[in-house]
Image (cartoon, helix red, strand yellow):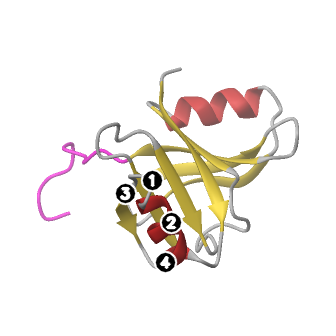
């Protein structure tokens, strides 16, 4: 299993204030959808913090996100091991495929892969 990055997800109603505060430490906004914002280091782009007021498509705000190379394989492995799945595997409109699971301490983990464009369908579909 190949991990691409691990990001803490921080539940917050102060997105603007956090952008300003962490900007003073050198982090820059790399994504903002109004309810979720990610800040990253411009020199080390996988060093990130994500702030969320809510999760628009899941029942809870996760505690962390782990981006893996193959989210389907991760889902199968965790299901086979009996891990609790909190949010089912699904494709999201912002280009990720993800699911939520609970770790042994009860933390909610958002496991995801960025979607890759499919080239196996005829154009026009």
Which tag, 4 or 2, sits closer to the chain's start? Answer: 4
Cα separation, mark 2 vs mark 3, equals: 28 Å
- Relative to 99, say whether 67 is above or below: above
Q: Residue at x 47, y 50 (%)?
A: 97
Magenta region, mostly helix, strand or loop?
loop
Residue plotted at (43% across, 57% down) = 39
Q: Who's the residue at 29% across and 39% down the image? A: 43
Tally of numbered discs: 4
Residue 59 position in % (x across, y down) = 73, 68
Q: Which is in the foreground here, disc 4 or disc 2?
A: 2
Considering every residue shown, the one lying at the far right of the view is: 105
Res 95 label: 3
Distance from the alpha carbon under mark 3 to that under mark 4: 24 Å
Q: Which residue is tagged 1? A: 25
Give the label, 3 or 4, closer to the camera.
4
Percent from the top left, x then y, of residue 73? 55, 29
User: Can see residue 67?
Assistant: no
For mark 4, does the 10 Å Cα neighbourhood hold few (<14), some (14 to 19), or many (20 or more) residues?
A: few
**Residue 97, can we see it?**
yes
User: Pointer 3 and pointer 1: residues touching (CB < 8 Å)?
Assistant: no
Who comes first in sequence, dot 3 or dot 4?
4
Q: Are marks 2 and 1 in contact (CB under 8 Å)?
A: yes
Give the extent of the magenta segment.
Answer: 115-125
Q: Is residue 43 a member of the stretch shown in magenta?
A: no
Q: Secondary structure at mark 4?
A: helix
What whole-number distance in Å separates the C-alpha atoms at marks 2 and 1?
7 Å
**CA distance separating discs 4 and 2:** 9 Å
List the residue tagged with mark 2. 21
Disc with the residue nearer the chain's start (4 vs 1): 4
Q: Which residue is mark 4?
A: 16
């Amino acid at each position: 299993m190949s991990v691409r990055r691990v990001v803490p997800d921080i539940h917050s109603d102060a997105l603007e204030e956090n952008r300003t505060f962490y900007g003073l430490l050198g982090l820059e906004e790399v994504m903002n959808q109004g309810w979720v914002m990610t800040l990253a280091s411009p020199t080390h782009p996988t060093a990130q913090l994500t702030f969320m007021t809510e999760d628009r498509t899941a029942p809870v705000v996760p505690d962390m996100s782990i981006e893996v190379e193959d989210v389907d394989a991760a889902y199968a492995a965790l299901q086979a091991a009996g891990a609790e799945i909190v949010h089912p595997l699904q494709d999201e409109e912002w280009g990720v495929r993800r699911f939520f699971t609970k770790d042994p301490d009860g933390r909610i983990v958002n496991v995801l892969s960025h979607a890759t464009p499919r080239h196996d369908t005829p154009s026009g579909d």
